[in-house]
Image: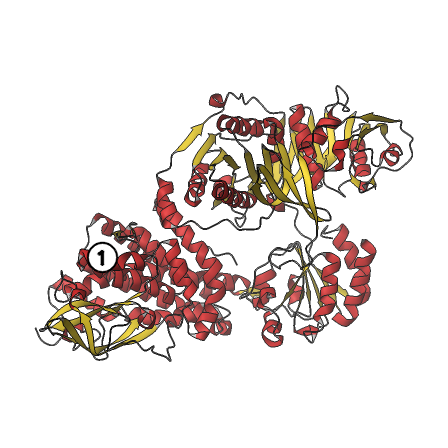
């Protein structure tokens, strides 16, 4: 079953040669190295270290960042990379999103020259893995009220608190952690061996199993003064990172949907029942047709957003729309694809339920579906409807 | 050392080939790729470039769409790119004439190519070009090395394989090679973007492409397979084996 | 009148040479046969329709070197001979291409049918399409083995021996035997696969014997890979490998959709299963309802008779 990515309106014909070559490079690697191994990685609940190495060698980490050993590709290329990775698995794409948009990006945008020169080159090669510590056990959609605290002790900062749901945490050398310093949210670079820092893995997930999800625990964690990100205060810092990751996810979800569509179509053409392939029955065609429609719309949304990002002509609400829509339809497509596969759809012979379970996380992380919905509501009306207070 | 690799762009081997009104419908080809045996030749050429510090020149002959394939070759390390631009059918003499003129223009110590292209399945280009440029030739090779002024290769034969050596200049046509074509990386892709492709036409190569004495009459899809036949018992096996040999031609 | 470049198998004439003479008859032409290194000259002289055999002897024939061989035999191709036929075997094709370039005439490779004109039929795109071409002038044509009837032996053509060598550029350093490891399923042109119906992992040895006889790879369904611990590399199916051989023989495999996904693009499918209702028979070109215990020994014997 050779993979054919659904592209009904030929949106990929708009890619530049460079973007096309990057696409083919990642797609071929996913075909050769990820697809044959992903079900096993998922069963074992591991993120194969070879994938970290390969992503570094291909040079796709921190795709849109320029300088300091980073790729310097267009935002469209970054989106294409996310899409091709997530066609393989959302956990794989999460590794790259966190590394590039949530760990490398804040250092690139808000760090000192010394920090950029020290961390970015090794993160671009994948030698140092990064993670992003914002979410806490009691603070998810409401990060502003976080309780992780940093105290200035003269020659060091002392960090106390805990972060949860942190992709890459346990395998990271570098953690970009957001904590309140004198009541103001600041970014801190915590390194693996800093005293008082541990990153236990969270076990028992039914979703993103081929990805490392961790807690970050700070118990009187001492970090040197030069680890604070000097150029940012407040939620602007973490939200800029999240917007970049969300942009990549809006493309990534398409990859997951394409994988589910491809499998569903192939299955429907092969599965004979009542002497005919089930693809010949109207209700099945309705489902496939709906999938094609949603994937096509999502592709156009993502592509145009990529153009706006590359032109600098975008606002966060543009990203919210794409992330929200594309992940939502991808999850629905995965569910309907499972239905088309019948009982076979529950086996890991087919990628369907793995994608379906993964997308449950993707719908919640990086801003839940409902939060993005309200972000757009606020944009339309000027009235925030997140909280009871004004 | 000048290492020349000849590359041909063909419909991807997974693409469906459709025949319309007695002609292969090229417009319906969804994906064009480097011919698979040429990929082995290119990988070997890259390894030769690395071991000899030589210069790798990739040459193709075909219409405008072939240029992308040359850029892909640059992304994995080809130094110079030559596109002999020609639209339409070329017979074996014409294609060999164009390619050998391009090779003579740059000068080659060694020429590598695939043993046959995935579209024509002919395999005449490598040996034909060897004759035209006055080089030795070895086909069905799986590996080529350069040692002490000589090229050595592993060549397949009916009893297995043999290690051969050849003096310069020489042409090697590749069967499945030891190594798959390497993957590009972003850096290679970005540098390839900047690489110029030298475009040449028949006139600039001093070649006249006159009307060929080989003309296409028609293309057709292969005949439909007969419906499946079912047989009872092991006693039917001699019949089936005969059919496999004579009807299906698979043994 | 056309010229045939003889093909040999070690010390004797390869049957394809007689088939080439048969092809010449199809074109209404008589032939002259050139025997590199003189091999098979006596046999060639007996082929009906052959007017002359030229035996070319020379040092260069010690190793296969197409440019040297072409040079050595070139002068033996008579003036005015426009059509040259050779076998579409690996060496035949290489030599023919060099000869064509030397004589500045086009070459058409691997023809499966010919008719006067000369109309040539050949397959392209690895068999996905068929091409008919018209060659109106001088040319070299290589012909696929077993495409033409061999001409009978009822002749005594004169044999002329010449000595002609040329500089050899290929030197053999070392002969290497065929690799003994079996082919991988993803590369093999013929695959024989076993499923649960084989009963046990040990019984796969019967499949391996047949694979060795055919030069085939051995594959397996997911069920036996999971349950009997066969290597995952031989698994054919949805989560195993997708294969596209010319011939796929499925033994004791029911044909569940996951397995079919991996092999249904095979050119020809043979199924051996004792259950006449097994779904594999729906996709098989040749289905044999029999147990593997009954079928495989017979299959092995029949294949032995062929070679």
Q: Is residue A179 visible?
A: yes
**Which type of secondary structure does the marked residue at label 1 adopt?**
helix
Q: Kindly identify which chain the residue marked by label 1 belongs to.
A: A
The colour mode here is secondary structure
User: What count of labels does the image hold?
Assistant: 1
The residue closer to the viewer here, A197 or C259, is A197
Residue sitting farthest toward the front: B148
Is residue C50 toward the left or the right of residue A219 in the image? right
- Viewed as shown, does residue C32 lie left or right of B85? right
Residue at the image position 47 percent from the left and 74 percent from the top? A346
Q: Mark 1, residues whose alpha carbon is within 10 Å: few (<14), some, or many (≥20)? A: many
Front residue of B75 and C259: B75
Place of residue C203 in the rendered image (x, y in percent of width and height, measured from the top left): 72, 72
Residue occupying image coordinates x 79% and y 31%: C24
Camera-side residue of B4 and C191:
B4
- Is A190 positioned to the left or the right of A385 in the image? right
Is A177 placed above or below B213 here?
A: below
For the question of whether residue B116 can be seen, the reply is no
In the rendered view, does B117 fall on the left or right side of B183?
A: right
Q: Position of residue A316 (x, y in %)?
A: 19, 59
Expressed as whole percent of the image width and height from the top left, the position of residue B159 reads: 73, 49
Q: Residue C47: x percent and y percent?
A: 87, 34
Q: Is residue A258 above or below residue A43?
A: above
The residue at 36%/42% (across/down) is: B191
Residue linked to disc 1: A116
């Amino acid at each position: 079953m050779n993979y054919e990515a659904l592209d009904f309106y030929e949106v990929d014909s708009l890619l530049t040669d460079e973007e096309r070559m990057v696409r083919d490079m990642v797609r071929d690697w996913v075909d050769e190295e990820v697809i044959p191994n992903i079900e096993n990685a998922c069963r074992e609940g591991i993120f194969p270290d070879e994938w970290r190495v390969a992503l570094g060698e291909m040079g796709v980490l921190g795709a849109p960042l320029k300088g300091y050993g980073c790729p310097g590709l267009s935002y469209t290329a970054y989106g294409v990379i996310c899409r091709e990775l997530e066609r393989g698995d959302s956990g794989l794409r999460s590794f790259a999103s966190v590394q590039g948009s949530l760990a490398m990006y804040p250092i690139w945008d808000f760090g000192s020259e010394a920090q950029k020169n020290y961390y970015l080159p090794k993160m671009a090669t994948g030698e140092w893995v990064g993670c992003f510590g914002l979410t806490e056990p009691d603070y998810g959609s409401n990060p502003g009220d976080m309780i992780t605290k940093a105290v200035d002790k003269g020659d060091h900062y002392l960090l106390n608190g805990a972060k949860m749901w942190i992709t890459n945490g346990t395998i990271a050398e570098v953690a970009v952690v957001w904590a309140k310093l004198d009541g103001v949210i600041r970014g801190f670079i915590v390194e693996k061996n800093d005293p008082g820092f541990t990153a236990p893995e969270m076990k028992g997930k039914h979703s993103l199993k081929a990805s490392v999800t961790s807690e970050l625990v700070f118990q009187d964690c001492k970090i040197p003064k030069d680890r604070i990100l000097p150029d940012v205060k407040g939620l602007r810092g973490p939200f800029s990172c999240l917007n970049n990751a969300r942009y990549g996810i809006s493309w990534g979800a398409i990859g997951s949907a394409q994988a589910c569509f491809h499998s569903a179509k192939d299955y429907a053409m092969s599965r004979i029942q009542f002497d005919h392939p089930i693809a010949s029955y109207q209700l099945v065609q309705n489902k496939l047709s709906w999938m094609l429609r949603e994937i096509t719309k999502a592709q156009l949304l993502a592509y145009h957003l990529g153009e706006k990002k590359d032109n600098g002509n975008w606002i966060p609400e543009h990203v919210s729309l794409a992330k929200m829509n594309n992940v939502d339809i991808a999850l629905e497509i995965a569910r309907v694809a499972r239905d088309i596969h019948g009982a076979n759809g529950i086996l890991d012979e087919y990628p369907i339920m793995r994608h379906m379970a993964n997308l449950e996380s993707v719908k919640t992380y990086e801003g839940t579906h409902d939060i993005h919905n309200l972000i757009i509501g606020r944009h339309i009306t000027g009235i925030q409807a997140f909280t009871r207070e004004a | 050392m000048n290492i020349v690799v000849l590359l041909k762009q063909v419909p991807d081997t997974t693409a469906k080939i459709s025949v319309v009104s007695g002609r292969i419908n090229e417009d319906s080809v969804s994906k064009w790729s480097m011919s698979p045996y040429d990929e082995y030749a290119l990988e070997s050429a890259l390894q030769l470039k690395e071991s000899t510090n030589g210069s790798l020149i990739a040459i193709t002959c075909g219409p405008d769409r072939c240029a992308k394939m040359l850029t892909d070759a640059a992304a994995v390390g080809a130094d110079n790119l030559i596109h002999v631009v020609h639209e339409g059918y070329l017979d074996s003499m014409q294609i060999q004439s164009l390619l050998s003129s391009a090779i003579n223009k740059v000068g080659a110590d060694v020429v590598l190519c695939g043993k046959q292209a995935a579209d024509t399945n002919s395999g005449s280009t490598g040996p034909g070009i060897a004759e035209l440029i006055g080089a030795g030739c070895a086909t069905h090779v799986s590996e080529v090395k350069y040692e002490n002024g000589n090229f050595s290769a592993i060549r397949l034969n009916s009893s297995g394989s043999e290690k051969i050596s050849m003096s310069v200049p020489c042409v090697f046509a590749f069967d499945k090679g030891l190594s798959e074509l390497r993957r590009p990386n972003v850096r290679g892709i970005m540098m390839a973007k900047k690489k110029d492709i030298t475009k040449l036409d028949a006139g600039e190569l001093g070649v006249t492409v006159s009307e060929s004495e080989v003309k296409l009459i028609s293309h057709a899809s292969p005949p439909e397979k007969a419906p499946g036949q079912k047989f009872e018992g092991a006693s039917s096996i001699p019949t089936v084996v005969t059919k496999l040999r004579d009807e299906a031609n698979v043994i | 009148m056309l010229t045939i470049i003889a093909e040999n198998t070690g010390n004797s004439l390869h049957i394809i040479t007689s088939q080439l003479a048969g092809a010449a008859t199809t074109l209404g032409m008589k032939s002259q046969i050139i025997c590199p290194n003189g091999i098979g000259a006596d046999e060639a002289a007996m082929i009906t329709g052959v007017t002359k055999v030229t035996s070319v002897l020379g040092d260069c024939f010690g190793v296969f070197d197409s440019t040297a061989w072409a040079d050595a035999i070139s002068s033996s191709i008579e003036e005015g001979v426009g059509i040259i036929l050779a076998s579409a075997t690996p060496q035949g094709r290489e030599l023919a291409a060099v000869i064509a370039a030397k004589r500045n005439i086009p070459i058409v490779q691997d023809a499966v049918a010919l008719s006067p004109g000369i109309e040539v039929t050949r397959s392209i795109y690895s068999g996905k399409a068929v091409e008919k071409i018209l060659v109106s002038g001088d040319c070299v044509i290589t012909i696929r083995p077993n495409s033409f009837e061999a001409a009978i032996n009822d002749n005594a053509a004169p044999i002329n021996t010449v000595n002609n060598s040329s500089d050899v550029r290929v030197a053999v350093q070392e002969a290497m035997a065929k690799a003994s490891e079996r082919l991988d399923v993803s590369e093999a042109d013929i695959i024989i696969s076993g499923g649960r119906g084989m009963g046990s992992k040990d019984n796969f040895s019967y499949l391996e014997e047949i694979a060795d006889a055919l030069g085939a790879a051995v594959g397996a369904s997911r069920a036996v890979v999971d349950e009997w611990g066969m290597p995952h590399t031989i698994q054919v199916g949805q989560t195993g490998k997708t294969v596209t051989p010319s011939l796929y023989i499925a033994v004791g495999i029911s044909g569940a959709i996951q397995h079919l996904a991996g092999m249904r693009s095979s050119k020809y499918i043979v199924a051996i299963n004792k259950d006449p209702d097994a779904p594999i028979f729906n996709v098989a070109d040749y289905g044999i309802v029999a147990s593997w215990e009954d079928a495989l020994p017979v299959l092995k014997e029949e294949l032995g008779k062929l070679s």
